[in-house]
């Protein structure tokens, strides 16, 4: 409500105008509303997987002049220890000690960003449970496997060869993942996979 009051419009309208459209998103994103009728600002944005990937590239690029220059460098590093070795929490971002970070939705959607490797992994899913169960571990293992492919030269023409990735547990066609690597010329290069 604070941002909405300050800019005189709903938070989603402000985001569409200031970030979503200028960053080149293709589909409309939606935001869940709370009981007050206002957007739930700490979570709950729904978007197409490709637009999650574009948002990841937007973050990887530092916000393209649309957010303060140092915002993402502060937001995406450990601000709080969560009691789990190698992990922490920034400003709405889960952080890893290797410098990567992620936005993680409770039913499987997520954006994993690894600046060192110039890697973005976007996912949409329909997990049957919010936070309990092995799916979060499978997602983490998937991120690590893609990082390993990048490090081991298993990336051809800036594309992650998803056929080299193994599946984890019971993930099925409800779990759609898109691995994207930032090409030197800034193009989005991606290949979808069902895993």
Image (cartoon, rainbow, N blue to C red):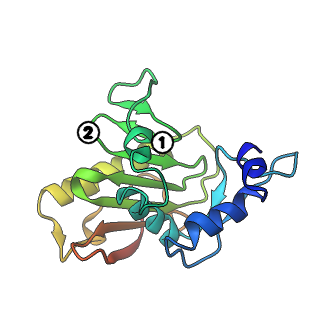
* Disc 2 to disc 1, C-alpha distance: 14 Å
User: Is residue 171 shown above or below 80?
Assistant: below
- Residue 98 shows which numbered tag? 2
Question: Closer to the camera, 182 or 17?
Answer: 17
Q: Residue 62 occupies which quadrant of the picture?
A: bottom left
User: Is residue 84 shown above or below 124?
Assistant: above
- Residue 93 shows which numbered tag? 1
Of the image marks 2 and 1, the number of the one nearer the N terminus: 1
Rendered location of residue 116, percent (x, y): 22, 51
Q: Is residue 54 left or right of residue 127?
A: left
User: Is residue 135 shown above or below 156?
Assistant: above
Q: Residue at x 15, y 55 (%)?
A: 151
Residue furthest out toward the left: 153
Residue furthest out toward the right: 36
Q: What crowding class fits label 2: few (fewer than 14 Cα within 10 Å), some (14-19), or many (20 or more)?
A: few
Question: Closer to the camera, 62 or 52?
Answer: 62
Rendered location of residue 147, percent (x, y): 24, 53
Rendered location of residue 6, percent (x, y): 73, 48
């Amino acid at each position: 409500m604070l941002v909405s009051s300050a800019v005189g419009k709903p938070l989603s309208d402000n985001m569409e105008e200031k970030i979503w459209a200028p960053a080149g998103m293709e589909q409309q994103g939606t935001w869940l509303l709370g009981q007050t009728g206002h957007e739930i600002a700490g979570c709950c944005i729904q978007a197409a997987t490709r637009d999650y990937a574009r948002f990841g590239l937007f973050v990887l690029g530092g916000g393209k002049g649309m957010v303060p220059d140092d915002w993402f460098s502060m937001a995406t590093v450990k601000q709080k220890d969560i009691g789990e070795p190698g992990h922490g929490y920034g400003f709405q971002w889960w952080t890893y000690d290797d410098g990567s970070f992620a936005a993680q939705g409770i039913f499987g959607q997520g954006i994993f960003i690894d600046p060192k490797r110039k890697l973005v992994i976007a996912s949409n899913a329909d997990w049957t449970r919010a936070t309990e169960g092995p799916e979060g571990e499978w997602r983490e293992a998937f991120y690590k496997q893609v990082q390993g492919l990048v490090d081991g030269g298993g990336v051809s023409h800036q594309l992650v060869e998803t056929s080299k990735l193994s599946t984890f547990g019971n993930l099925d066609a409800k779990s759609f993942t898109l691995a994207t690597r930032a090409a030197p010329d800034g193009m989005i290069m991606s290949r979808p996979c069902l895993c």
